[in-house]
Amino acid sequence: MIRKEDSVHTIIHAHPEVAKALQELGFVNILNPAMLNTVGKIMTLPKASVMMGISMEVIEETLARHGLSFTE
């Protein structure tokens, strides 16, 4: 389970498979260690969805296809 308030950095370290799912959505820098270790520490998935213009619904559906879901 993933919490929406967790940083992208925290999520990817707990669930490495999330990186590939996010990359499929267009988060092209997600595998760049410098980006993950800087911006990734302050970026949450809701913030990233706004920045990238991708709805949270699409992110949730993509993660679900990879066997992951959000906690409430």
Image: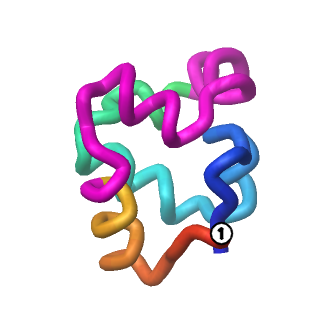
The residue sitting at 52% across, 74% down in the picture is 69
Q: Position of residue 14 (x, y in %)?
A: 73, 61
Taking the magenta stretch, the answer to whether it contains residue 43 is yes
Looking at the rendered structure, the secondary structure element under dot 1 is loop
Query: What type is the residue that disc 1 sits on?
Result: Glu
Which quadrant: the C terminus? bottom right
Q: Position of residue 71 (x, y in %)?
A: 65, 71
The residue sitting at 75% across, 46% down in the picture is 10
Q: Which one is nearer the viewer's eye here, 4 or 43?
A: 4
The residue sitting at 25% across, 45% down in the picture is 25
Q: Which residues are magenta?
A: 33-58
* Label 1, residues with CA under 10 Å away: few <14, some 14-19, many ≥20: few
Q: Quadrant of residue 53?
A: top left
The residue furthest front is 72
Taking the magenta stretch, the answer to whether it contains residue 54 is yes
- How many marks are shown on the rendered structure? 1
Q: Main secondary structure of the magenta part?
A: helix
Q: Which residue is mark 1?
A: 72
Q: Quadrant of residue 33?
A: top right
**Side of 26 relative to 36 (left or right):** left
Q: Position of residue 32 (x, y in %)?
A: 51, 26
- Whether 34 is drawn above or below 71: the answer is above
Q: Which one is nearer the viewer's eye here, 2 or 57?
A: 57
